[in-house]
Image (cartoon, rainbow, N blue to C red):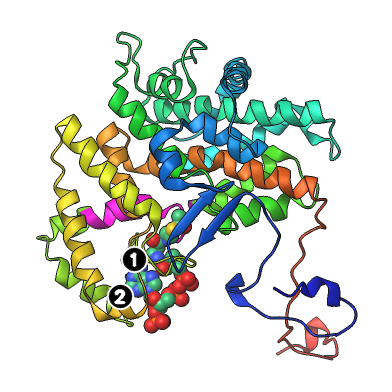
Amino acid sequence: AIDISKLRDQSGYITLDSGFKNTGATKSAITFLDGERGILKYRGYPIEELAEKASFLEVAYLLIYGELPTQEQVDKFQYQISRHTLVHEDMKKFFDGFPSKSHPMGQLSSLVCSLSAFYPESLDPNPSKEDQELTIIKLLAKMTTIVSWIYKKSLGHPVNYPQNKLDYVTNFMSMTFSYITEDYEVDPIVIDAMNKLLILHADHEQNCSTSTVRIVGSSDCNLYASISAGISALWGPLHGGANQAVIEMLEKIKNDGGDVDKWVAKAKDKNDPFRLMGFGHRVYKNFDPRAKIIKKACDDILAKLGIDDPVLEIAKKLEEVALNDPYFIERKLYPNVDFYSGIIYRALGFPTEMFTVLFALGRLPGWVAQWKEMKENKEPIGRPRQVYTGETNRSFVALKDRK
Ligand code: ACO
């Protein structure tokens, strides 16, 4: 790769690469992705192995600090997080202020940004190592409470407080699905599935939301605001919002009689804006390795929970038709991470509008790790150039003389 930034001020040329299809924005030692061969590794560990053997918190530690934690380190990490799961009581007023039908992603982005108001030590552009660590811990801890409370408020139910004796994922599920009158029964199958899903979403190098986090952070903006910007970027249906869009699409196909050929034809029609949601990826030109794992997990979990979801059948048929169609073959369009994840979230009891929020919960350690790396590498402020195509040299016309 050529480091074109070194040519600055020498050439006078601007490289134009719409959508950054071939432009590296940074060097990074966090996640390795080979899109041609369908390989994904966090810090050198294959995603398949991490999803099978690690807990989400171990993976979060690995991404943020570079090494898998020892038992002692992961216990300390869990302990520190547990001590910070409460959100300020005044934040409850924000939750109360949102209309009950407002989208959870809009709420999440605002609530995460508002943490900067409660923890002003995060505003220091050059924080001490201790303060930066504390901000990271607080964010990881409070995110579960915020996500859980967004869900509870959407139902009009009272919120549950976090329980420090529980591990990260169990605490989150318990806060989310317990009722005042009934404790959430922890099913290890569900906790295992949730751990897996969060791990698979934990990082994905310089995607739209991660690049957003890095570029916002490069202005020395605080961590909460940088992550809030990443959450907004993730919301779009071409990115993380695809998991919601996939289920909505599968439901539509089912309610329309389940004729998948018709919908594949629609997706190929260049005069029709419809795309097969959950298909295609900027970098993967092969199977998304996360989709492979999720597809299998989806079968396992539905079987173990005894759930028969008709949209899973539609999804499988759609995949089969698309993967054998020359249009999809030529363009190397394969199912991505979002194609099957929603079916699992649904089986675990989450409503469709919460899916992208769960993606954000999983992606959080990746965003944090990338933000931290950007700061440690002392990267310059992100500031893309442009090729100007507008008018040149016009003379001002007074208002009264304009036609
Ligand atoms: N359905 C039908 N055609 C598609 C699809 C699709 N899902 N995805 C891409 N194509 C076609 C395009 O129309 C284009 O065809 P053309 O060469 O005839 O013009 C070709 O494949 C290349 O597509 P681009 O849009 O140029 O690819 P790009 O890398 O810019 O976009 C993206 C990638 C946004 C993911 C795209 O594939 C898409 O819109 N997919 C559906 C949304 C989705 O699932 N997003 C989640 C991605 S994973 C994630 O962010 C977590």
Disc 1 packing (10 Å; few <14; some 14–19; many ≥20): many
Residue 172, position in %: x, y? 44, 24
Horizontal relation, residue 228 to residue 107: left or right: right
Residue 365, position in %: x, y? 58, 39
Which stretch is magenta?
235-250
Q: Quadrant of the C terminus?
A: bottom right
Q: Quadrant of the N terminus?
A: bottom right
- Type of the residue with mark 1: Tyr
Q: Secondary structure at mark 1?
A: loop
- Residue wearing tag 2: 328
Horizontal relation, residue 382 to residue 175: left or right: right
Q: Which mark is residue 54?
A: none
Q: Residue furthest right?
A: 9
Say which label, 2 or 1, has the lower sequence index. Answer: 2
Q: Secondary structure at mark 2?
A: helix
- Marks 2 and 1 close (CB-CB < 8 Å): yes
Instruction: Tell me if I can see residue 102 in this picture.
Output: no
Instruction: Tell me if I can see residue 338 in this picture.
Output: yes
Q: Is residue 259 above or below residue 89?
A: below
Q: Is residue 151 above or below residue 366?
A: above
Disc 2 packing (10 Å; few <14; some 14–19; many ≥20): some
Q: Is residue 332 above or below residue 204?
A: below
Instruction: Tell me which residue sits at (45%, 19%) in the image.
Output: 171
* Residue 245 part of the magenta-drawn span: yes
Q: Which mark is residue 334?
A: 1
Instruction: Tell me which residue sits at (63%, 36%) in the image.
Output: 67
Ligand 1 shows up in the quarter that is bottom left
Residue 170, position in %: x, y? 41, 21
CA separation, marks 2 and 1? 7 Å
| Dot 2 beta carbon under 8 Å from ligand 1 | yes
